[in-house]
Image (spheres, rainbow, N blue to C red):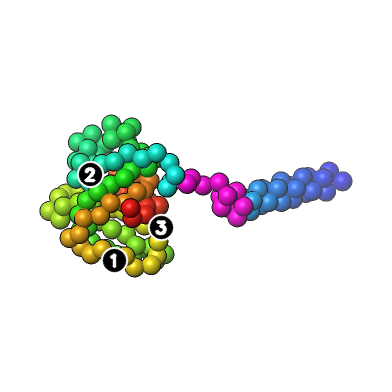
Amino acid sequence: MKKMSKLIYVLAVVALSALGGYYYVFVYSKNHHRDIQSEKWVAIQADSLSAQYQTDESKANGLYLNKVLKITGTIITISKDQVGKITLMIGKADAFSNVSVTLTQTYPITQKPGDIITIKGLCTGALSDVVITDAVIE
């Protein structure tokens, strides 16, 4: 009888964990994400942003990490990521570090490399480039 109650207890824990995971992935996360476009933003030039991250990454993270930024700069490249979203590299072609932007849209944009663009998106830190996600063209 003890083995049966342990089995029921383990099955109940597994079922509740699966139900909680399902709820988080398919219900909660769809209804509770940030509305970046309605948040306050910080305006900055792409060159200045990448320079600040190169100079002092921890200080730049304190200023910009998980904040909405409105960034203006020159488009270096336009490409698509693995899921078909447009990614832009903004800054100077000869710079060591630039700003990598992933747009929320999947349809083509009218801008081309060399054009100046302003985007608004979420700063997620820096790898070799400063990373901006969930961005839209202003």
Q: Which residue is mark 1?
A: 110
Q: Which residue is mark 3?
A: 104
Mark 3 neighbour class, 10 Å CA radius: few under 14, some 14 to 19, many 20 or more? some
Q: Which residue is mark 2?
A: 45
Q: Determine the image quadrant of residue 26.
A: bottom right
Q: Residue at x 33, y 53 (%)?
A: 138
Q: Residue at x 36, y 57 (%)?
A: 103
Do tag 2 and tag 1 residues touch (Cβ < 8 Å)? no
In this view, the mark in front (1 or 3): 1
Q: Which residues are magenta?
A: 25-35
State left or right for residue 132 relative to residue 94: right
Q: What percent of the width, then of the height, locates residue 52? A: 22, 37
Residue 79 drawn in magenta: no
Q: CA distance from mark 2 to mark 1?
A: 21 Å
Q: CA distance from mark 3 to mark 2?
A: 21 Å
Do tag 1 and tag 3 residues touch (Cβ < 8 Å)? no
Mark 2 and mark 1 lie on one chain; the one further toward the N terminus is 2
Mark 2 neighbour class, 10 Å CA radius: few under 14, some 14 to 19, many 20 or more? some
